[in-house]
Amino acid sequence: MRPYNNEYRISPDLGYYASCQKAISLYISQLAAGKTPTWNATNANCPLYRLPNTYKGYLACDFVRGRWYAMSYESWIRYELYHNKAYRQFWSNHSSIFLVKPDYLLQRNGTEIDWLASLLTFRIRLLGCGEAEYLVNVDTEWNKPLWMLMHYRLRREDHIHYTSLVANATLDRWTTATFAVIPSTDTQELCVQISWETSEKTLSQCVSFELDGACVQQNAAILHDGLSRNASLLFVILLLFFKSAYCE
């Protein structure tokens, strides 16, 4: 707002005044700790004279995104007029009501990659020993079509020794699907690359996860049983071969 050519913040953000920073930080910390601090209003450089005395009350000062608020603004300005060889004092009263609907700030430092990263949700959920599910969600504030490329890979320290393509599709708001995982003691990773038509950069994110130790042991037991069966089968084949050769 710019009433009377001066700027006023609509949001009651307690951190706006530089001269109040230290006192506000201490006050909020005490509120968060469940204490009931007393605000010192004697600081001439800090225009805040009263603050909420509970943490719940402090949180109530913040706006909720997407909700309409009616804010009342009132001011009283004193002025003087010279009339009949005397100065007389008068007051000019002014009041206004502003309708406000808070939303995301469009001004932000960084590139569009930094901006998109803050709006992206990328999660993984294991479904047993051989399968997992991913979720990729983009906030509704991002209104451009996105292209998504996703890979599953196994990494041992800095060496990636296995990779497979999981998804290659257009991301429309959100997407979820399952993919196969390999029971292994190596680091499991699911990496997504997201780009769009007008951007020269690509957003890359990887999520690491680990399988339960029982899954790795179960897979080792299956491999051991398979090798034992194969060895037994090979022994029978060799026995039959030598027996046939001896009979001839």
Image (spheres, rainbow, N blue to C red):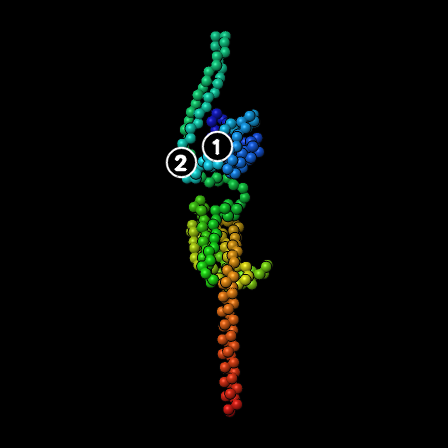
The answer to whether residue 163 is visible is: no
The answer to whether residue 74 is visible is: yes
Of 180 and 92, the residue lying toward us: 180
- At 42% from the left edge and 30% from the top edge, which residue is drawn? 71
- Does residue 19 lie above or below 171 as drawn? above
In three-dimensional space, the C-alpha distance between marks 2 and 1, rounded to whole angstroms, equals: 22 Å
- At 54% from the left edge and 34% from the top edge, which residue is drawn? 27
How dense is the environment of label 1, judged by Cα within 10 Å: few (below 14), some, or many (20 and up)?
some
Q: Earlier in the sequence, mark 2 or mark 1?
A: 1
Of 86 and 190, the residue lying toward us: 190
Q: Which residue is mark 1?
A: 52
- At 43% from the left edge and 55% from the top edge, which residue is drawn? 176
Measuring from the top left, give residue 19's x and y in whole percent.
57, 30
Of 21 and 173, the residue lying toward us: 21
Circle 2 SS class: loop
Pick out the residue farthest to the bottom. 248
- Does residue 12 lie above or below 184 as drawn? above
How dense is the environment of label 2, judged by Cα within 10 Å: few (below 14), some, or many (20 and up)?
few
> Which of the numbered marks, if any, corresponds to residue 163?
none
Of 39 and 226, the residue lying toward us: 39
Q: Could you tell me the amino acid type at mark 2? A: Trp
Measuring from the top left, give residue 158's x and y in whole percent.
59, 59
Measuring from the top left, give residue 190's x and y in whole percent.
50, 57
Q: Which residue is mark 2?
A: 68
Pick out the residue farthest to the front. 35
- At 50% from the left edge and 81% from the top edge, which residue is drawn? 236
Which marked residue is nearer to the observer: mark 2 or mark 1?
Answer: 1
Measuring from the top left, give residue 200's x and y in whole percent.
52, 50
Q: Could you tell me the amino acid type at mark 1? A: Pro
Circle 1 SS class: loop
- Whether the residues at callouts 2 and 1 have beta carbons within 8 Å, the answer is no
